[in-house]
Image (spheres, rainbow, N blue to C red):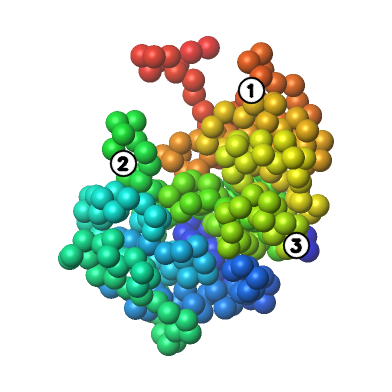
Amino acid sequence: MKPMSLPKYDTVPAAFDAVVSRWPDELAVLDGNRPWTFSELNDLANDIAGILPDEPRIGIILDHSILMIASMLAVFKAGKAYVPMEPDFPVERIRDILQEAEIRTVITQKAYTDRLLPDVKPLIPTLPMVHHDLRQPAVSGEDPAYILYTSGSTGRPKGVCVLQRNLMHYVRAFHHEFHNGPGDIMLQGSVCTFDIFVEEVFTTLLNGAALAIPHTDEFHARMQYCEDHGITFISGFPWLVAQMNSEKLVPSRLRILISGGDTLHHSQMDMIADRVPVYNTYGPSETTVCASYYCASGKQPLADGSHPIGRPVLGASMEILDEAGNPVP
């Protein structure tokens, strides 16, 4: 199916509603081997949104599954911001985040309730859910979408708040570069606290493409999953590209391989660069996932063997400053 761009939206709920309206029966999420259509995902998100409390920020501590994706969409639909934490984070780190972000409710599973602070309420959605009619509040592009706690230069995690309009800007920038849409399937491989996760999930679903969640972390099993389910997009760190490169493993339907989060060296991609376009991407969390793209396939590396970070994404600009913060030629 030929990818089609949607009209410009400043919020996730508006964009997602448009996708559901246009492609209700298209594949949205493959949870292991269980397919969910956009209509089914929307119903589940509405049900979860209908039981959320009136609080500005909602924590999420869930295994990677349809419930995690639906919960994030539910938080958006309810006009709130989500704060994700992986269940295997150290307990003290989870509690520090809960306290600093002033979170009072966490969407979670029974197995993880012992990680919460005593005054934090666990909200445990289970399938199937009781249908709730959602009175969706007005959501503005200026409303917070999510808060990611990065490692921080001081060693103490810091929360980076991204607005709805910033997230939607990146959704458009991704589509402009990669032309994804119905028929494309993105592998969901990142932890939920990395920018890569945001790229995997929201640039995919909000452009009408599908998300595939494998229930394995083992490299070869994941590559076989990609082959079996026709994965067309993979986004990950350079070490993943390097492992695919060293074993010359490229799923047959993969059409874009994205590297981000660290320097990409030519030696990490030289054996597969002629089989799939390999992109080097760059951008701190504060710039909403990526600020620049560079297609490294067919290009010569820099003198140190690395590839450049490329040019600004659609609708963005970049400046190079010296140590004093002054522009350089």
Q: Quadrant of residue 243?
A: top right
Q: Residue at x 48, y 84 (%)?
A: 128
From this view, report whether residue 293 is shown above or below residue 173.
above
Q: Amino acid at mark 2?
A: Lys
Of 307 and 229, which appears nearest the observer? Answer: 229
Q: Which residue is mark 3?
A: 228
**Label placed on residue 306:** 1
Q: Residue 57's spot in the image, x, y percent? A: 30, 60
- The Cα atoms of the two marked residues, 3 and 1, are separated by 32 Å
For mark 2, give the secondary structure: strand
Q: Residues within 10 Å of mark 3 (few under 14, many from 20)?
A: few
Q: Are marks 2 and 3 in contact (CB under 8 Å)?
A: no
- The Cα atoms of the two marked residues, 1 and 2, are separated by 29 Å
From this view, report whether residue 34 is shown above or below residue 225.
below
Q: Residue 284's spot in the image, x, y percent? A: 46, 36
Of 283 and 230, which appears nearest the observer? Answer: 230
Q: Residue 138's spot in the image, x, y percent? A: 38, 68
Q: Are marks 3 and 1 in contact (CB under 8 Å)?
A: no
Q: Earlier in the sequence, mark 2 or mark 3?
A: 2
- The Cα atoms of the two marked residues, 2 and 3, are separated by 39 Å
For mark 1, give the secondary structure: loop
Q: Earlier in the sequence, mark 3 or mark 1?
A: 3
Q: Residues within 10 Å of mark 1 (few under 14, many from 20)?
A: some
Q: Which residue is mark 2?
A: 158
